Image (cartoon, helix red, strand yellow):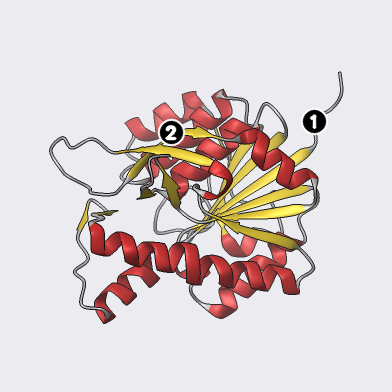
């Protein structure tokens, strides 16, 4: 059986992509990763800042952005424009043939508008399908996809879509074609046994360990869906998911490894 080529998918967001120094450091580490690679980015702080400058109210519920018509225009400008093309231009300066994409470009990620239940999130999308063959084709011609957190419904509507989810769904879709490692970069060095001690990184988590950590309250809040998504990716064939700090991207032995 032919061995699969290696693919590393990096998801990064928050202050990292919005501060020139941290972004430059991250992209240099990303550029040095061997094999095929793909970057999924956020940019919510920049969207909130631009919305304020334009007099558009930002409404959040449990950390999720309500995306009405005005906010959709802003996130499209920021995610698909300013942040995405800044990342692409910097990667070009580092010798990578980066290509900036939303889910609508080449129909790479299709979603449906989230149904209204207790809350109407507006133009927010839940992923239905990732076009793995199209992404494979881009990778095989030497392109480095840089994906903004926007998808489409194939009926002409753009949809604001969670970048963590997009990275996880992309990793799952690509696992049949590549040996995939998914890396979530955030502000902590990994999942911590003690949230006040950055030296208390939990090196490995599987389903059994996860259940125990949730039961004891060590893992709580927003970290629960992040690890659950990671475990689902592993169940779907992703080799491993690494949760680590952006400045550890040059050493993927660091952080928490979900297997």
Q: Is residue 1 left or right of residue 198?
A: right
Which residue was labeled with disc 1?
4
The spot of residue 76 in percent (x, y) is 40, 62
Q: Is residue 238 visible?
A: yes
| Mark 1, secondary structure of its residue | loop
The spot of residue 107 in percent (x, y) is 54, 42
**Vertical relation: 207 (above or below) 88:** above
Q: In the image, what residue occupies the spot 55% across and 50% down?
A: 105
| Spatial separation of the CA atoms under disc 2 and disc 1 | 26 Å
* The one of 243 and 191 positioned closer to us in this rendering: 243
| Mark 2, secondary structure of its residue | helix
Which residue was labeled with disc 2?
228
Q: Is residue 54 left or right of residue 39?
A: left
Q: Residue furthest front?
A: 156
Q: How many numbered dots are placed on residues in this image?
A: 2
Q: In the rendered view of the protein, which quadrant contains the N terminus?
A: top right
The spot of residue 173 in percent (x, y) is 59, 31
* The one of 108 and 218 positioned closer to us in this rendering: 108
| Earlier residue among tags 2 and 1 | 1
Q: Nearer the viewer, mark 2 or mark 1?
A: 1
Residue 182, numbered circle: none
Q: Is residue 16 visible?
A: no
* The one of 211 and 241 positioned closer to us in this rendering: 241
Q: In the image, what residue occupies the spot 33% across and 76% down?
A: 50
Q: In the rendered view of the protein, which quadrant contains the C terminus?
A: top right
Res 128 → quadrant: top left
Mark 1 neighbour class, 10 Å CA radius: few under 14, some 14 to 19, many 20 or more? few
């Amino acid at each position: 059986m032919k061995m699969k080529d290696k693919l590393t998918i990096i998801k990064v967001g928050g202050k990292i992509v919005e501060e020139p120094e941290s972004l430059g450091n991250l992209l240099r580490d990303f550029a040095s990763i061997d094999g095929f690679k793909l970057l999924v980015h956020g940019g919510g702080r920049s969207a909130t800042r631009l919305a304020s400058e334009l007099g558009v109210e930002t409404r959040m519920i449990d950390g999720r952005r309500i995306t009405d018509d005005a906010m959709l225009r802003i996130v499209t400008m920021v995610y698909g424009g300013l942040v995405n093309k800044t990342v692409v231009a910097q990667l070009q300066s580092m010798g990578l043939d980066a290509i900036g994409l939303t889910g609508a470009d080449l129909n790479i990620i299709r979603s449906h508008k989230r149904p209204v239940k207790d809350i109407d999130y507006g133009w927010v999308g839940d992923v239905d399908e990732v076009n793995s063959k199209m992404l494979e084709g881009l990778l095989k011609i030497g392109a480095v996809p840089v994906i903004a957190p926007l998808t489409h419904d194939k009926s002409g509507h753009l949809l604001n879509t969670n970048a963590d989810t997009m990275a996880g769904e992309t990793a799952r879709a690509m696992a049949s074609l590549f040996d995939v490692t998914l890396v979530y970069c955030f502000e902590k060095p990994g999942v911590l046994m003690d949230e006040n001690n950055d030296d208390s990184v939990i090196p490995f988590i599987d389903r059994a360990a996860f259940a125990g950590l949730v039961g004891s309250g060590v893992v709580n809040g927003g970290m629960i869906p992040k690890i659950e998504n990671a475990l689902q990716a592993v169940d779907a064939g992703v080799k491993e998911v690494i949760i680590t700090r952006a400045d550890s991207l040059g050493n993927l032995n660091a952080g928490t490894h979900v297997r």
